[in-house]
Image: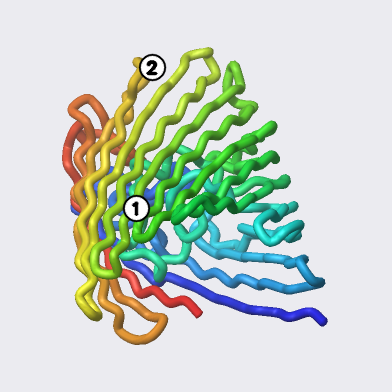
Amino acid sequence: MSRWHWNSFGTLGLAHSSEDRADFVFDNLQPKGTGFNRRWNPDLDSRLGVQLNADLLPGLEAVVQVVSEQRPDNSYTPFLNWANLRYEILPDLRIRAGRVAMASFMASSSRKVGYSNPWIRPSAEVYRLLALTNSDGVDIEYRLRTGEFTHTLSALYGKKTVINTRDQHVHNTDVWGVYDTSEFGPWTVHIAHQQKHTDNQNPPLGKFWSAGVSYDSGLWLLNAEWVRAENYDGRRVLAVREAWNLAAAYRMDLLTPFISLSQLRPLTVVSGTPVSQTTLATGVRWDIRKNWDLKLQWDHVRPGNDSFGTLQAIQPGFPKGKPVNVVAVVLDFAY
């Protein structure tokens, strides 16, 4: 007999930028951000999601997750974030087929569930370096226990089409990745490597690496994450970029103050304006009731001296290297 489990999550947010000649966005798939288009913007962090887990047969589970958030066409049309079948071959070995999450980052599976994180959003410098968050294909996972260590090893193969803000369909094929998450007491270490072929690059091959470590004592949460991306443009120019993030949070009963420092920098010279940026973020989370929290966050975004950073919709007169301050407040829930 099938057993069905429903979960829901959501974030209602509002963000304000100190600058009206450029937009602050989380990634380059957000068509409009906070600043030039809207000084007070609810779209930056707001989303709703629902997830269904169904135990169909012994060892066989179906997972469907639908999310509504600002999309590249500036709509809130719901989309399938996950939709897969999972089969447990052995107690420590399972395979999934369908639309599956890619374990590219430390917070890949929880990045859209604001309630599961101390801060409002993960580092834009780090998480914008890979537009793919899921893949249509298969993955296999094996859990290995060695002494006090637990290793979760996985491999993925698939494809994914991404529609950008110019309504272009960017096709990613031969997407594959290998991942390892190791847990030991309060420590978690995650490493990942991915490759893909993207049809708007020449040559099409793109590569991605990431590594992260987290320490969670129950009171303190400390995170460190590093990523590297290599991609070609349409003129055979290789762009290599690296980004890192350091973050800390301290749980004080219902309040959790946090601080984060991130940096994105190019390692190769390419045509156009380089994308380099450093962000200092700080804020506080208040758990107002069970399954609900309220967060306040301030981001000080400083593009490189010769760069606009990750800012978009740059208007005439906005100088390179000018810092921007963004303040956001959100209400999160998860059931």
Circle 2 — which element? loop
Label 1 neighbour load within 10 Å: few <14, some 14-19, many 20+? some
Q: How is the image coloured?
A: rainbow
Question: Could you give the CA–CA distance between mark 1 and mark 2, rounded to whole angstroms?
Answer: 34 Å
Q: Is residue 118 above or below residue 127?
A: below
Q: Quadrant of residue 288?
A: bottom left
Q: Where does the image place residue 93, in percent across and percent down from the top left?
A: 69, 54
Element class at badge 1 = strand
Q: Type of residue at label 1?
A: Ser
Can residue 297 be seen at all in this image of the molecule? no
Mark seen at residue 214: 1
121 lies above or below 20: below
Provide residue 96's location: percent of width, then percent of height.
71, 54
Residue drawn at x 47%, y 14% is 237
Residue of label 2: 270
Q: Residues within 10 Å of mark 2 (few under 14, many from 20)?
A: some
What residue is at 74 percent from the left and 73 percent from the top? 55
Check disc 2 and give the amino acid type: Val
The reply to whether callout 1 and callout 2 are in contact (CB within 8 Å) is: no
Residue ID at (24%, 63%): 220
Residue 150 showing in the rendered view: yes
Left or right of 39 on screen, residue 106:
right
Q: Relative to residue 9, is residue 55 drawn left or right?
A: right
Residue sitting farthest toward the front: 147
